[in-house]
Image (cartoon, helix red, strand yellow):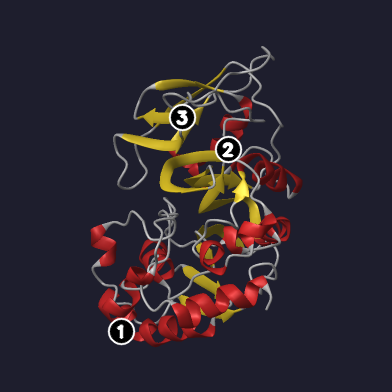
Amino acid sequence: MSTAQMVSEFYGKTVEKTADLQFDACCVAEYDLELLRPITAEVKERRYGCGSPLPDVAEGLTVLDLGCGAGIDVFLAAQLVGPKGRVIGVDMTPEQLDIARRNVEPIMKNLGFARSNVELHEARIEEIPVESGSVDVVISNCVINLSEHKQRVFEEIHRVLKPGGEFLIADITADRRIPARLAKDARLYSECLTGAAYGGDLRRIMQRAGFEDVRSVKRRRLGDVIEGIRFDSVLLRGFKIGLEDACEDYGQVAVYRGTIPRHADQWVLDLGHVFSAGSAVRVCKNTADMLVQSRYGAHFDVSPEMYHMGLFDCAPAPRAGEAPVAASGCC
């Protein structure tokens, strides 16, 4: 049995709801209670995620959810993009997609939408059935760790995104490379642990796919420890923008206008960049380009480049008791 078949059987036949999971890697997700209100009980009982990768400034966008399962994030995103937007869900497990499909009509009715803004496809995330350059935001919730071909997944994400598009991915990372024998354990692998990439390897994979400076938006240490291996739940943000491989200082400043819905006081780009409305913040060139060349540009005033002042130290501070993490950018 291939790894893909093992995972599909696990989520199609072995587990029927979130409560069936034994580890906490993929059963802890932070959701807005108001957004959950229109979601049917059948979908809410099948939440297999480690975070909430829902985008801000989403009205009218095309959002793609990789490994959508029973559709919880698809239906949450459908509310954010609104009737004029579009949400595409992709999953390889027929049983999960059957649940999502039979809940489209009742959830759209709860939302008051005249017609569905959701479409669902049975496919693998290494071969996304979506046109190149057609997606504004790619989201995924604790799924990419289940793929044996993570490089291909990120290449596909880069392909389908529009220029200036963004990915928001909640996933599990490991603090070291996991031995192959542990990856063969069906339960540990399928519950999003022993398929997790070592953080340094994941950064290199994303760079090779074209995402030079990926940022960590949130990070949570899991309680699960396997043979000394520790795991983090992370929310990653990356842009399809030509960025440098290091944070370079050009004397730029960014001011948040306070205009992103539900974030009037402050907005978080990543762990090292929390923008308070009206306050000037020094930023590196990569950060400035992320703000200016993405859909967030309308919500920021960013000063032009002055001259090169060398490297800009904008990496987040290490957590208590941990050494700084070497990175190519601000992640």
Quadrant position of the C terminus in the picture: top right
Query: Which residue position holds label 1?
Result: 106
Residue 142 at what x, y percent from top left? 50, 59
Q: How many marks?
A: 3
Within 10 Å of the Cα at label 2, are there few (<14), some (14-19), or many (20+) other Cα atoms? many
Residue found at the very far top of the displayed protein: 309
Q: Nearer the viewer, mark 3 or mark 2?
A: 3
Amino acid marked by disc 1: Pro
Amino acid marked by disc 3: His
Amino acid marked by disc 2: Met
Distance between mark 3 and mark 2 Cα atoms: 12 Å
Q: Earlier in the sequence, mark 3 or mark 2?
A: 3
Residue 201 at what x, y percent from top left? 69, 44
Residue found at the very far right of the displayed protein: 208
Query: Which residue position holds label 2?
Result: 290
Query: Which residue position holds label 3?
Result: 273
